[in-house]
Image (tube, rainbow, N blue to C red):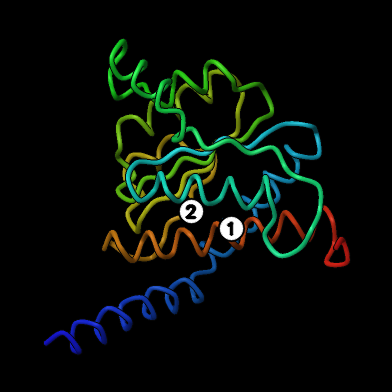
Amino acid sequence: MIKSLIKTSIENTRNTIDAALGDRDLLAAIENAGKTCIEALRAGKKILIAGNGGSAADAQHIAAELVSRLNYDRPGLAAVALTTDTSALTAIGNDYGFDYIFARQVEAIGTPGDVLIAISTSGNSANILASIKAAQAKNIATIGMSGKSGGKMNEVCDLIIKAPSSHTPNIQECHIMIGHIICQIIEDTMFGKAAS
C-alpha cells in the first residue's frame, strides 16, 4: 500500500510537470514574469513576495534565491518575503485582521515600479487578494501564482501563472519549479552565465 502511494505521488508530480511543458500560455506567462521582474530590478526596484502556509515557504525560498544566489555568484537582488517578520504579521493581524497582513506591508514598503509576486494555490486567499489590491493602488506590478483555475486572482492580477493542477501539493511543487525558472531567467539575463 505504501509503495503504491509513493508511486502514485511521483506519477502525479510527473503528470503536472508534463502538463506544464505542454502549456504554451503557462510558458509564456513564466517568461513574461521574468521580464517584468528584470525591468523592475534594473530600475532599482524590488520584488515583494507573499503566500500562506506552504506558499509562505515558497515566498521565502524565492526571495532567498534572489538575494543570495541561484546558480552562481553575482550581486544580490532586492527581494523581500512578506511572510517572515513575526512582529509585523502579528501586530497587523491583531490590529487590522489577518486579511491585511500582507496588504499593510505593501502599503508600508512598496513603491511604484516594484513587483508583487502573490502566491495562492486556490487563487482565492483573502489576504493575497488584499495585497494585490494594495499593490495596484501604488502602481506595483502584480504577478499571481495559482492552481489550474486561477480563482479570483484571474480578475485582479496583471499577470497570472497557473500551475496545471487542482491538487495543492502538486501545485506547490510546480510553483517552486516555476520560481526557480523565474530566478534563473533573471540571473542569466542580468548577469550572464559567466558572472561567477
Quarter placement of the C terminus: bottom right
Residue identified by numbered label 2: 161
Q: Residue furthest top?
A: 95
> If you read the primary sequence from the N terminus, does the residue marked by circle 1 or circle 2 appear first?
1
Residue 30: image tag: 1
| Residue 17 pos. (x, y %) | 44, 75
Amino acid type assigned to the residue bearing label 1 in the image: Ile
Q: Nearer the viewer, residue 28 or 175?
A: 175
Q: Residue furthest left?
A: 1
Is 166 positioned to the left or the right of 109 in the image? left
Q: Residue furthest right?
A: 194
Residue at 30 percent across and 77 percent down: it is: 12
Distance from the alpha carbon under mark 1 to that under mark 2: 7 Å
Quadrant of the rendered image containing residue 2: bottom left
Amino acid type assigned to the residue bearing label 2 in the image: Ile
Q: Residues within 10 Å of mark 2 (few under 14, many from 20)?
A: many
Q: Would you place residue 99 above or below residue 189 in this image?
A: above
Quadrant of the rendered image containing residue 191: bottom right
Q: Would you place residue 85 above or below residue 193 in this image?
A: above
- Secondary element at tag 1: helix
Q: Are marks 1 and 2 in contact (CB under 8 Å)?
A: yes
| Residue 127 pos. (x, y %) | 34, 29
| Residue 135 pos. (x, y %) | 53, 25
- Secondary element at tag 2: strand
Residue at 32 percent across and 83 percent down: it is: 11
Q: Nearer the viewer, residue 134 or 74?
A: 74
Quarter placement of the N terminus: bottom left
Residue at 49 percent across and 76 percent down: it is: 22
Is 100 positioned to the left or the right of 134 in the image? left
Q: Nearer the viewer, residue 105 or 145?
A: 105
| Residue 140 pos. (x, y %) | 60, 28
